[in-house]
Image: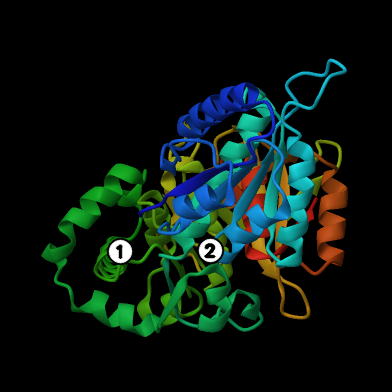
Amino acid sequence: MNFNYLYLPIGVPTFHLESAGKEFDKSVALLKSVDDSVIVPDEMLLSLDKLHAFIDDKHPDFVVAQNITFANGAYMTEILRTLDCPVLLWTLKEPVIDGGRLRLNSLTGAYSAANKLASFGRPFEYVFGSPDDEDVKRKVAAVLRAARLKSALNHLNILQIGQTPQGFDFGKATETEMATFGAKLLSVELEKFFDIAKSYKDDEVSEYLEDANRRIVGLENIKAENVRDFAKLYKAYKDFVKDNDIGALSSRCWPDCFTAYGTPVCAVLAILNDLDVPSSCEADTYGALSMYMGQFLTGRPTFFGDPVSMDKDENTVTFWHCGTAACSLAREDTGARAGVHCNRKIGPTLEFGCKAEPRVTIFRVGKKADGKFRLFLSTGEALDKPQQFLGTSIVVKTDKCAKALVENSVKNGWEPHFVVAMGDIASEMKALANMLGIEVEEF
């Protein structure tokens, strides 16, 4: 994916240019250190003509507009008139307060710029402070990661396999709705994959069986016929993903995988998650979209599941699902064990508790009753806990009150599937939601 962004140090030449020049150099160094795809002007843009000349032939994915000194609202108007992309507005701290004249007057310029951004109806991120400030560096880095994710979503093909089960329609996506995120939605019936899988000869899936045995502990304990049929389904899914450049997928599972095919898809989805193809079950496409976001920002598979238990004394919420979690999330002492489905008693599924993580983010792209999108967001740590129930589970000690999280999210009508990302990506998710015009509900 090609991604680039512009650094626009706007201002006028009537302020203290020596101070401005030092901030310019430090700002360039900071931006290159957090994301070197930045396009930087050779000099500060201290006139509208210089600004126009620099941006006129550019097509960036993102803009960092910094008041290197005061600049009136015409500068931001020129930026918004020429460039159609998200903006981070950056105000510099006044370098010296000594009773003399303002060296930069950056903050007043920011008000002028923000007024224009609001007038144009353009959402924007904002940061105040010197390039030397660690909080500034963290904020800039988080917003740039969010901008990269937004750009990646514009190139995402997300696959919806089959229909949601009865009563699970909250996960069903449409092409029009998915366009809110820039992604392209493809829909294929589950039976197509059954037919493809059944067409394979046993020797055509030997490499898939070998791969699965490297990842999953105890496949030899599962009925051989089911393991063979799992490998065929694994090949069918993986080949389709590769041939159609699929970046994430949701798959219908019950009852069809048991009744029409005879083997669950759980372990297939688990391995795809480890292969950097975020994959959700029960055809929850917005769950898969959420998983993609989390995996993009952390570089690691996410956990997808239901909140099934809350312990107010431990301040924990347990998330669980039948057995689709990425094998790499399993505790070291058990590994990713093979098992049978808790209800249907057919395998292979995955059976394990997830390993501890010092920081995790719980989130989900969901919908309000009026159909508008919203983002659930909470943070905490994943505790060192064994498998809680048959299937896969992760126990999260939330930063805020777990009891209030459960009560309020139920009252607010949130969907029953959530994503747990391995890392604190709350700042990035809030920035992304702002860029997309989506409301955030923090718990």
Reply above or below: 103 against 421.
above
Q: Is residue 257 among the parts visible in the rendering?
A: yes
Given residues 374 and 384, the one toward you in this image is 374
Rate crowding at label 2 as few (under 14), some (14 to 19) or many (20 or more) other CA atoms within 10 Å.
some
Real-space CA distance between mark 2 and mark 1, rounded to the nearest whole angstrom: 47 Å
Disc 1 element: helix
Q: Quadrant of residue 164?
A: bottom right
What x and y, as percent, mark residue 160? 45, 76
Disc 2 element: helix
Report the side of 190 relative to 83 (left or right): left
Residue at the spot of label 1: 234
Q: Quadrant of residue 85?
A: bottom right
Q: Earlier in the sequence, mark 2 or mark 1?
A: 2
Q: Is residue 387 among the parts visible in the rendering?
A: no
Reply above or below: 136 against 40.
above
Reply above or below: 228 against 131.
below
Amino acid of disc 1: Tyr
What x and y, as percent, mark residue 252? 48, 75
Amino acid of disc 2: Thr
What x and y, as percent, mark residue 1? 35, 55
Residue at the spot of label 2: 82
